[in-house]
Image (cartoon, grey):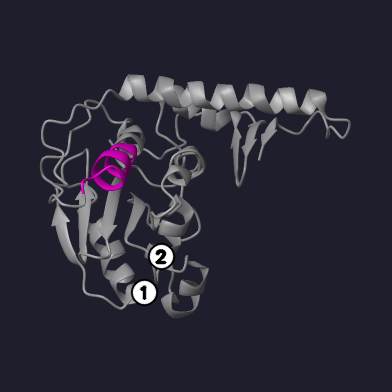
Amino acid sequence: MARHFGDSLGMSSPKPYLSYHDIRLDTEDIKALKNDWLTDSAIAFWEEWLEREILPKYPEARIVLLRPVVSHLLMQTTDLKNDAAALPDFRKVTHIFLPISDSRDRWNADSGSHWSLLLVSVIDRVAFHYDSLGGSNFPAAKRAVDRLSWVLGLTLRFHQLDDTPQQENSKDCGVFVCILMRHLLIKRLLNANSNEKVSMSMSGKMIDSRGGRKEMLRIVESLRKEGERRRSASPFAGSSNDPPRVD
């Protein structure tokens, strides 16, 4: 039965937990990371971390990790011509990662029941769709590709990766998106041999969703401790209600 990303989370008001550059996580995002559907903020945090910790090691890379809320805007706006101004400048970009939600609520990017991953190779004019629940998000991904084609001014071929690793429950889709994103980014794009043709197939790739959750939580906790250390050492510490911050 379809459920929304926040349905099983508690009804109590969430408390700020970590501020990491442009992303703010609260206690409900952490609960979701432990054993629930990942929120858009949790996925956005992972993208922010990849951009801050991985991409700087490859200064020549021209890769964009589109945040879930921006992907949602791309798919749901009724005024794509004007709202395209809110998108990044893609003119020199080679690849774009987009978390795809099946949400149909224009105003709430966190209202869907399934995440999948879209990787667009602008230089090859092809979009690869990785769905850990069969073809559940095919319509949403196809809509995103059609709209991104218009924004880029290119005709993109849509390729559904039927060999994408499949989740074994109903709530690991967001974790699969994060793990696949990092694998594709590092192994298939950043560390690829420029003299060899790179396969974007995920055939044979095993996804450890439990291990993925633990790793993401370890990163969050490590950053939170660093934020607490910086706050305690600063003579300009903010309010005790503010979460630990790392910039």
Residue 90, given in percent of the width and then of the height, sits at 40, 68
Residue 10, given in percent of the width and then of the height, sits at 54, 27
**Image marks 1 and 2: residues in contact by CB distance under 8 Å:** yes
Give the labeled residue for mark 1.
Answer: 151
| Residue 35 visible in the snapshot | no
Residue type at mark 2: give it.
Leu
Residue 119, given in percent of the width and then of the height, sits at 28, 53
Give the labeled residue for mark 2.
Answer: 74
184 part of magenta stretch: yes
Please tell me whether mark 1 sits on a helix, a strand or a loop. Answer: helix
Residue drawn 46% across the image and 58% down it: 70
Pick the residue in front: 190 or 107.
Answer: 190
| The residue stretch that appears in magenta | 182-193
Q: Quadrant of residue 187?
A: top left
**Looking at the image, is 233 positioned above or below residue 41?**
above
Residue 163, given in percent of the width and then of the height, sits at 11, 40
Residue drawn 42% across the image and 38% down it: 5
Residue type at mark 1: give it.
Val
Quadrant in which the C terminus appears: top right
Query: Residue extending furthest front?
Result: 195
Pick the residue in front: 181 or 112.
Answer: 181
Left or right position of 238 against 70: right
In the rendered structure, find residue 191 and report the number of the disc placed on it: none
**Looking at the image, is 239 positioned above or below residue 59?**
above
